[in-house]
Image (cartoon, rainbow, N blue to C red):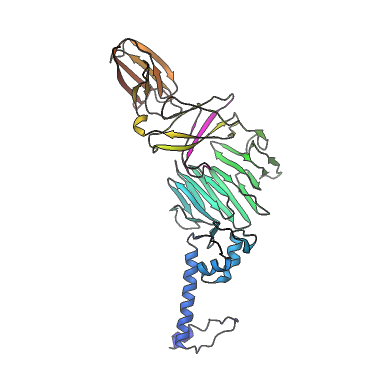
């Protein structure tokens, strides 16, 4: 009993006075149980827990439910930037236990490093805290929801560090890759993003920050972004809607009009997306998402040509499609959004299809940016040739109309840079039968 009594010498009553050592065993056990419940409640709330506000909820009740004490309501108010505690909105998501952002959407593999702990895989619903480093792998896409309703999208092959995140200040550092932010009106709060050369201040807007392919840039789709250079003699710039700026190099901190949203052309070939070429465009980007806000990204690719070939790995169905163009400075322009139906992968493999008017549509798999040599003949030896294209940019071609019945042979060979002299160069071939009239 002596040992047990000494363990409670450090307990205090609610007035702050030390409790006497000679406490009845039943009371000691009750106090210990309450202490364990409190600690368990705090640990539970630190595991990325969130709460969806219901009608009649109060911060006092929410604190009691998750923290086993109503006295933590002020911390919940601060973490979630609740202006008036009495005016909680039904459906509002509150972050608990120090997590003031959660991974709302995740496609592919992403990783989180916290402190000195080993890197661990991220999952949908995971909490994000200050000091965390998030990394997305190739073909992985991550979206975070912040306490104030703002969203941050981290596309593939990107790395982001959370410097500060609470109810009043959000500060990220883009280590590499890209991030796209949809920031709610800040109402006195601060949303900032740091790159290796500048710091960006946001007051409610939709914008991108990129550090990819030796280009560091900001592009504003809605609102305004204040740019402060990280230098001994810093410059600053206010970037307005539909404008962008490089953040490093000789042309840094100069505002430029962003390229216009590209026009999508209706494609006659399944699996291909065609874009109306833009003058002075140096390339294009395509993104596919499950939602019209493009928070649930599933695929993206970049091409120097106004043409994209979708991969066979995409599940068939409707997707939201976003296209952008790049100017000669490598600033990415305004987006054009539409919907597209992706056919089953079997219809996007190599083969020939009759169009019913004497013409045939021939397709083969490939990726954007590849160049093929296409040949058509009446013999398997491809001699003599009926038609050829020595530098065909695409993976589909329409031939005909044919009036002579019989068997026709086709083949396409990858002649992209570095591929023509490779033993592993892609080559596709097939044949089709033209019936007698």
Q: Which sits in the foreground, 286 or 399?
A: 399
Percent position of residue 293, x then y: 53, 43
Magenta-tinted stretch = 280-304
Percent position of residue 344, x then y: 36, 34
- Which quarter of the image is occupied by the N terminus? bottom left
Q: Which sits in the foreground, 117 or 246?
A: 246
Q: In this image, 231 relative to 332: left or right? A: right
Count of numbered marks: 0
The image quadrant of residue 351 is top left
- Which quarter of the image is occupied by the C terminus? top left
Residue at (63%, 41%) from the top-left corner? 222
Residue at (68%, 54%) from the top-left corner? 188
Percent position of residue 83, x then y: 65, 59
Identify whether 341 is placed above or below 170.
above
Q: In this image, 280 relative to 395: left or right? A: right
Residue at (47%, 55%) from the top-left corner? 126
Whether 302 is among the magenta residues is yes
């Amino acid at each position: 009993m002596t040992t047990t009594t000494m363990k409670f010498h450090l307990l205090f009553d609610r007035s702050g006075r030390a409790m006497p050592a000679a406490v009845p065993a039943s009371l000691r056990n009750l106090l210990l149980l309450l202490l364990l419940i409190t600690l368990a409640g705090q640990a539970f709330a630190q595991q990325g827990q969130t709460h969806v506000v219901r009608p009649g909820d109060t911060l006092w009740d929410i604190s009691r439910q998750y923290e086993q004490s109503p006295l933590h309501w002020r911390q919940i108010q601060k973490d979630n930037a609740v202006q008036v505690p009495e005016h909680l909105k039904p459906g509002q998501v509150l972050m608990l236990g120090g997590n003031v952002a959660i991974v709302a959407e995740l496609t592919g593999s992403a990783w989180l490093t916290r402190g000195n702990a080993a890197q661990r895989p991220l999952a949908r619903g995971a909490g994000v805290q200050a000091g965390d480093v998030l990394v997305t792998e190739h073909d992985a896409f991550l979206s975070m929801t912040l306490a104030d309703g703002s969203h941050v999208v981290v596309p593939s092959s990107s790395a982001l560090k959370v410097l500060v995140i609470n109810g009043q200040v959000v500060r990220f550092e883009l280590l590499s890759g890209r991030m796209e932010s949809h920031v709610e009106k800040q109402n006195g709060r601060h949303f900032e993003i740091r790159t290796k050369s500048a710091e960006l201040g946001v007051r409610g807007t939709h914008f991108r920050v990129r550090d990819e392919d030796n280009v560091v840039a900001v592009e504003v789709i809605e609102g305004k972004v204040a740019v402060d250079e990280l230098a001994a003699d810093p410059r600053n710039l206010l970037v307005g809607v539909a404008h962008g700026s490089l953040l490093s190099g000789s042309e840094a901190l100069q505002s430029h009009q962003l390229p216009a949203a590209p026009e999508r052309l209706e494609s006659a070939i399944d699996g291909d997306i065609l874009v109306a070429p833009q003058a002075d465009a140096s390339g294009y980007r395509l993104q596919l998402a499950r939602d019209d806000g493009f928070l649930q990204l599933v695929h993206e690719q970049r091409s120097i040509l106004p043409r994209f070939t979708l991969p066979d790995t995409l599940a068939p169905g409707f997707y939201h499609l976003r296209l952008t163009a790049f100017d000669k400075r490598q600033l990415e322009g305004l987006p054009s959004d539409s919907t597209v139906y992706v056919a089953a992968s079997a219809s996007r493999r190599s083969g020939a299809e009759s169009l019913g008017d004497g013409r045939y549509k021939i397709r083969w798999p490939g990726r954007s940016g590849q160049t093929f040599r296409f040949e058509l003949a009446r013999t398997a030896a491809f001699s003599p040739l009926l038609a050829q294209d020595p530098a065909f940019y695409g993976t589909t071609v329409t031939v005909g109309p044919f009036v002579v019945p019989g068997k026709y042979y086709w083949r396409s060979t990858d002649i992209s840079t570095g591929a023509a002299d490779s033993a592993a160069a892609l080559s596709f071939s097939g044949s089709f039968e033209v019936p007698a009239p």
